[in-house]
Each structure stands twice: as C-alpha cells, then as structure tokens.
Image (cartoon, rainbow, N blue to C red):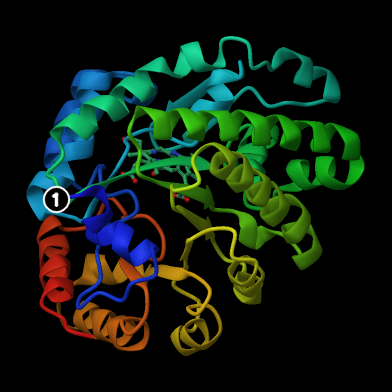
Amino acid sequence: MKTADKPLLRALGGETLKHPPIWLMRQAGRYLPEYREVRTKAGAFLDLCYNPALATEVTLQPIRRFGFDAAILFSDILVVADALGQKVGFEEGRGPVLEALTTGKDLGKLSLDGFHEHLVPVYETIDRIKGALPPETALIGFAGAPWTVASYMIEGGSSRTFAKAKGWMHGRISDFAALVDLLVEATSQYLIRQVEAGAEVLQLFDSWAGALSHPDMRQFSLAPLRKIVANVHARHPEVPVILFPRGVGAGYLDFAVEEFAQGLGLDPGVPLEWARDHLQAHVCLQGNLDPQLLVIGGRGMGAGVARILHRLGKGPFIFNLGHGIVPETPPEHVAELVKLVRESAA
Ligand code: CP3
C-alpha cells in the first residue's frame, strides 16, 4: 500500500471515506493489562518513554489488539520541558511534577543545547515503530502546544486555576513571551525531527486552551500553533497536522477558518451540527465521543457513536474520543467501538 492510500492520510487529505478511520487518544495505556506489565518492568514512566524497545512495544499493543488506522508514538508532551533542562517526574496518583519556573531568571536554566541528544531515544522509537507497523496503519507523532506545556512548567504540575501561569501571561509579559518563543522553536525542531524519523502525521495537544479568554487563546494558543505549523510545513509541506485545542468552544471556528492545519480534534462538548455546518468545509474533523461512554459501553455507547457518525460521517472525518481514554475503560468496549465504526456506512 502506498503511503497516500492509508485511510488516515486520505481523510486528512479531504476525502470522505465509506467508514471513517479510527484511532483513540491515549490508546496505549493503563486500561491494557499488557501495558501495565511493561510499565512495571520499565520502572519510572519517563524511563519507559526513553526506552526505544519498550516504547515501541507499548505503541504496538493497541494496534495488535484492535487494528486501529493509526499508531501514536508512545511518549509524553512533557519530554520537551525535560529536554530543555527542567527536571520532570511523574508520581503515582499525582501526575507530572516539575521544578516550577518561578522568575524570569529560571528561564536561563533552559536551553536548546543538547535538546536533540536528549530526545534521540524518541527518534529511535519512531524509526522502530515505522518498521513494525502494518502497511495500512499511519504513524502519528505529537507534541504539546506551547500554552499547555508552559502551564506545567510554571505551575510545576497540573492546575485547576492556572493562577501562576496566567500571572506570568499578564504580569511577567516579556518572560512569558520568551518562554513561548522558546517552546515554539523547540517544538518546531522536535516535530521536524519526528517527521524525518518516520512520523507521517503530527498532532499538537493544547489540552488547556479552554482555560483562556478568547483574546488570550488567539495570542497564546492559536498564534504559537500557527508558527509551529508554518515552521514544520516550510521543511515538510506534505505532512498533515491535527490540532486539538480542547475546550475552546466557538473558538474552534478561528482554528478552522484559518486553514493552516489539516485536521481539528473536537472535545465532547462541541455541537455536532454546528461543527458539520461551520468547520468541516475547512478541515478534516476528528472526535469526539465522551470517554466515559467508552467505559459504560452497550447501548449508551452505541447511541453516541451513531449520532457522531450520522452528523460528521458525510465529510472528511476521523473517529476518535473527545479526550484521552481513561484507565477504567474495559478493553472489550474498545473492540466493540472499532466494530461499530468499521461496520458503519455514512
Ligand atoms: O496517546 C497515546 O497513547 C500516546 C502517549 C501519550 C501519553 N501522554 C502517555 C501517558 C500522549 C499523546 C500524552 C499526551 C499528554 N500528556 C497530554 C495531552 C493530552 C491530554 O490528555 O490532555 C498531557 C496534558 C500530558 C501530561 C500528562 N502525562 C499528565 C497530566 C499525566 C498524568 C495523568 C495520567 O493519565 O496519569 C501524564 C502521564 C501519562 N502520559 C500516562 C501515559 C500512558 C500515564 C502514566 C503511567 O503509565 O503511569
């Protein structure tokens, strides 16, 4: 099969397929017993991310089980902060823990020197995955968007209010701009290397874009993403990019009409008719089943899937969740979901 014939790439090229390609955000992870086994063997979470043999294995696990149309590199958005020199750890039950940036002086500790050397295991993982995938399966590389990554770097972990990150955005304006510029440069270079290692599609996760006002979203989510995509496309114009600015509401229109990316990931709250009528003429849409419906399964899930396929299946579309799979998800429900989507006809 030629690269261009892969269903995921056809959808991102603007084709409407008889049934949409399907993959799931966080499709490798703790809901799979075979992942938990490898995870235990690897030790710390980042050790797994930087171990090409084990990271390749967990990337392939959901492909073997479910035959998704795409594999997504197993890594994390915070490896970029780690490679820039900020210590990143993951604690059981707490998530990411970083030594928070407190003042502009801390920016001096971050540097692009040694950035790629640190990330060599990730590039090697991509190369290995590429050699092991079935011919019809596309390989997705990814990175976090500058706003989402900056929020972890300034907060030192997850946050509900983003008080510190917004404090920088509106109080330490030039420090915040310098951090965003550094992340634009680092992320652009990182994604270019991922393409050169074998990634065929790129997804940018802006998981916390929905926490911003509309003008802040345009300035600190959309504008940096536009720059990153321009940098990547200057080197690799053929690579489709999917943006996932979770929670931006009517702001999705801004991302769609500017047409700088080929795909747009919708969260579960986006009204389907609105998306079909206002977004789908501009970009291939992706989404947006509520991850809890995948936990519940049965008729609730079936009805949710049917609604989405009915509204979005008549244009360029990729079936996905509206956010990542949760660890409580029964793997049998995932198999059932793939069957429902594959047996559908728009
Ligand atoms: O999708 C995939 O299968 C590829 C791997 C992937 C992971 N994280 C692995 C992971 C991807 C694409 C991500 C992206 C990511 N990481 C995002 C954006 C997407 C989103 O969910 O909003 C964010 C915000 C992060 C940061 C992060 N990493 C958090 C907040 C956490 C803790 C929460 C949790 O689920 O535990 C992680 C850890 C993480 N990243 C795990 C996995 C499989 C769980 C760690 C473990 O196995 O112990």
**What x and y, as percent, mark residue 271?**
49, 84
Is residue 145 among what the camera can see?
no
Q: Tell me how many marks there are.
A: 1
Task: Report whether 30 appears left or right of 245.
Answer: left
Residue 284, located in which quarter of the rendered image?
bottom left
Can residue 180 be seen from the camera position used here? yes
Point 30% across, 29% down: residue: 126
The residue type indicated by label 1 comes to Met
Identify the residue at horizontal 37%, vertical 24% (top origin): 122
**Camera-side residue of 313 and 294:** 313
Above or below, 298 relative to 115? below
- Quadrant the C terminus occupies: bottom left
| Residue at x 63%, y 62% (from the top left corner) | 210
Question: At which x and y percent is residue 19?
Answer: 20, 75
Picture layout, residue 109 above or below residue 307 = above
Q: Of 102 and 265, which appears nearest the observer? A: 265
Task: State the image coordinates of residue 173 (x, y, percent, origin top left).
Answer: 89, 40
Rendered position, 157 above or below 300: above
Q: Which residue is mark 1?
A: 1
Element under disc 1: loop
x and y percent of residue 125 in the render? Answer: 29, 25
